[in-house]
Image: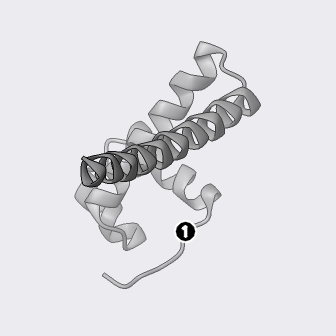
Amino acid sequence: MSYRKWSAEEKQQIVLEALTTSATAADICRKHNVSSTQIYDWREKFIQGGKKALAGVPPSREVALERENTDLKQLVGELTIANSALKKVWTMKR
């Protein structure tokens, strides 16, 4: 299948069609010229987004937590490298 950029609205329409109609996944794939793997991935993201919305996690809070998580992971990486370098220097001085 050829590469194509799908808009959020198109993805939503295809996923809703897959969830609400009796058509098989293969039929929907042929109709929209998309792979079944892509439809299943979109469907999973669609369902996860709905779960998050129903859980009441505001999107801005989620984005802030993801940003903080990324910053902390980067800090751990930097500290690990610094720790490794200090260990090498310490062993060389002995």
Could you say which is closer to the camera, residue 54 or residue 78?
78
Q: Secondary structure at mark 1?
A: loop
Categorize mark 1 by other alpha carbons within 10 Å: few (<14), some (14-19), many (20+): few
* Residue most extreme to the right: 60
Classify residue 68 by image quadrant: top right
Residue 81 visible? The answer is yes
Residue at 76% across / 32% down in the picture? 60
Give the residue at mark 1. Answer: 6
Residue at 58% across / 60% down in the picture? 10
Q: Is residue 76 left or right of residue 90?
A: right
Could you say which is closer to the camera, residue 28 or residue 68?
68
Residue at 47% across / 39% down in the picture? 76
Q: Position of residue 26 (x, y in %)?
A: 23, 60
* Residue most extreme to the top: 55
Residue at 52% across / 47% down in the picture? 74
Residue 16 visible? The answer is no
Q: Is residue 59 above or below residue 94?
A: above
Q: Position of residue 59 (x, y in %)?
A: 71, 32
Could you say which is closer to the camera, residue 61 or residue 81?
81
Classify residue 57 by image quadrant: top right
Could you say which is closer to the camera, residue 92 or residue 47?
92
Name the colouring of the figure. one colour
Q: Is the N terminus in the top left, top right, bottom left or bottom right quadrant?
A: bottom left
Q: Is residue 66 above or below residue 88?
A: above
Question: Hey, what amino acid is under mark 1?
Answer: Trp
Q: Is residue 21 left or right of residue 69?
A: left
Q: Is residue 28 left or right of residue 15?
A: left
Q: Position of residue 19 (x, y in %)?
A: 40, 39
Q: Position of residue 88 (x, y in %)?
A: 30, 52
Q: Is residue 54 above or below residue 80?
A: above
